[in-house]
Amino acid sequence: MSTLPTLMLLLLGVAAGGWVLRFAGQKATGNAPVFRDMPFAVAFGYILGAGLLAFSVWYYFQPTLTEAGTPNAGVVFFRWAVQFFIVATIAAFLFRALGRTVGTQFSKKMFRQMPLTASFGVLVVIVYAFTAIFAAWLAPHGQEAIFAKVNVLPGGNAATGGDPLHPLGTDQIGRDLLSRLIYGAQNTVGIAFVTTCLAFFLGGSLGFLAATLQGWLDQVLSRAVDVLMAIPSLIFALLLMTIASAWAGSERWLLTVYMILIIAVIDSTRVFRLARAVGLNIVVMDYIEAAKLRGEGMTYLIFKEILPNATAPLLAEFGLRFCFVFLTIASLSFLGVGIQPPLADWGTMVRDSAQFINFAAFSPLTAALPLLAAGAIALLTVGVNFVVDWMLHRSSGLKE
């Protein structure tokens, strides 16, 4: 039977199961509200979720080797994903429990109110920050160190082409992949953080200035921002980085500086819009008028009156903007115009090791090499977004 008819039969079976669940629940509970008011879509979702859970359990216990003796890459990768999810959940739970008992009164209260997803996000951010700061001590080798052995397979088993000195193997020119993965946190995350701070300084300052002064300055800045926002950011950044490559010449480190400035200017347009919108709502408040009557200057109004009252939305935007900048840098590096060698970054690692995916049928660990850098990018993005969602929930005044 082809795929489409099989899929249709499965959906019909799930739909029938949803109807049976709702009908049987109404009869068994005497038409209780939980089943009486249950929409069919909710019952369908329950059956679909139960079916996916049962399939996941069945698939997890499938053999990791096929009948021909080759690795079953799908089962191996699925087991790794499930095991990582379980370990991450336990780590987030223990981290939250630790935060509720250790620390200041403020931090303990914060951890008591923190959902498990936010706890996981905070833990991820701390781990990445620690790795980025202490990369020189954590990495077994330097990021630019080149060894005689090239294309060493991961695993550290000499019998299968590995090397104990290189647990994740080496790349095509002999650089240790574990060291470059660790240094990638320092370069990719560190540069993204600096770029985001610069974007917020530019966009936030100009946005508050436009909201405070208004008039012709507001119109000029707003129209300039409209023009920049009309161009797709990644395409615009790629175009400017191509031009910057010609300017940098043989000084490859200049290309990283140009990248920071280009991405900061492009992303500052989004920050400008938010800062201006928030600032316009604040400048009409009575305490702003009172400060003006006292003769306070522009610097005082922006940094002492407007900024403290705009902290919550700006902090939430900072987390989201950091993710976008982080992904933009990884994308530019993947395309070859981002962070330049010998600096290690995850985007370049994904590009350089992409061909190893073809070895999935023979060595799942080798095929996982490009997924390590891509997974590092995805994990930080998810973690930061968990924290941002929690911050938005807290700043909105909503209660559980």
Image (cartoon, rainbow, N blue to C red):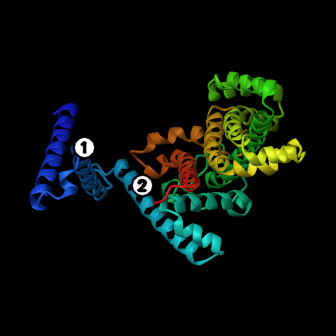
Give 183 or 115, whichever is nearer the viewer.
Answer: 115
Q: What residue is shown at x 58% (from left), y 70% (from top)?
A: 109
Residue 237 vertical placement versus 325 (above, below) = above
Q: Residue at x 73, y 49 (%)?
A: 144
- In percent of the image, x 69 and y 48: which residue is there? 310
Residue 313: x %, y % from top left: 64, 47
Query: Residue extending furthest bottom?
Result: 101
Q: Position of residue 335 (x, y in %)?
A: 63, 31
Q: Which residue is mark 1?
A: 41
Q: Secondary structure at mark 2?
A: helix
Q: List x then y, in percent, for residue 33.
A: 20, 56
16 shown above or below 387: above
Report the amino acid beneath label 1.
Answer: Ala
Residue depicted at x 72% and y 22%: 223
Image height of 138 relative to 203, above or below: below
Q: Residues within 10 Å of mark 1 (few under 14, many from 20)?
A: few
**Numbered badge on residue 183:** none
> Which residue does the numbered mark 2 point to in the structure image?
81
User: Of marks 1 and 2, which one's residue comes earlier in the chain?
Assistant: 1
* Depth order, front residue of 140/392: 392
